[in-house]
Amino acid sequence: MRKLRRSGLIRDPKEVVEWLKQRATRKGDCLITHLGRAKGYPATAVAGEDWEVHRLVFTVEKGPIPEGLSVLHSCDNKRCIEAAHLRVGTQADNLKDMAKRYRGRCSDWYNYQLKQKWRSV
């Protein structure tokens, strides 16, 4: 991708997504890209603009991302670019998903809150 990016051959986001999908590897239901990472997420540039790849795929396949929302992975794989695994949600939705799936530091806090809620019933 670097060679294509530097030469400016690919400027259309749809072409970049197609290029990514052709070079991705199928692993179960996920379509895994092998691009480098920024903040843990694969990233690329399109027409001089930097994109996290999952956000680019979502934008091309499903439409623009509403302001203030994130693109969440239902499969919990940061490298997955399967459009069916991507959805928009708030950061709070993302933290709830992390806790329910026992990922990250918030899972203990979330489960504590659930226990408190059930105790009050």
Image (spheres, helix red, strand yellow):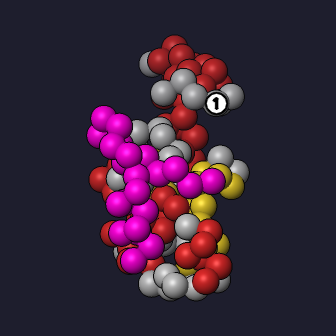
Q: Amino acid at mark 1?
A: Gly
Determine whether, in the image, residue 115 is placed left or right of residue 6.
left
Q: Residue at x 61, y 83 (%)?
A: 7
- Which residue is tagged 1? 104
Residue closest to the eye, 76 or 26? 26
Q: Residue at x 48, y 68 (%)?
A: 56
Q: Is residue 82 above or below residue 64?
A: above
Q: Residue 45 appears at what percent x and percent y?
A: 60, 73
Q: Is residue 91 above or below residue 52?
A: above
Q: Residue 36 appears at what percent x and percent y?
A: 63, 54
Count of picture labels: 1
Q: Which residues are magenta?
A: 15-36
Q: Residue at x 62, y 69 (%)?
A: 2
Residue 48 visible: yes
Residue 102, image quadrant:
top right
Residue closest to the eye, 43 or 7? 7
Q: Residue 17 appears at what percent x and percent y?
A: 41, 69
On-image quarter of the C terminus: top left
User: Does dot 1 land on a helix, a strand or a loop?
Assistant: loop
**Residue 27 lies in the magenta-colored region:** yes
Q: Residue at x 35, y 53 (%)?
A: 82
Residue 110 visible: no
Determine whether, in the image, residue 17 is placed left or right of residue 107.
left
Residue closest to the eye, 46 or 94? 46
On-image quarter of the N terminus: bottom right
Residue 57, image quadrant:
bottom left
Q: Residue 68 appears at what percent x and percent y?
A: 58, 67
- Outermost residue toward the top? 119
**Residue 75 lies in the magenta-colored region:** no
Mark 1 packing: few (<14 Cα in 10 Å), some, or many (20+)? few
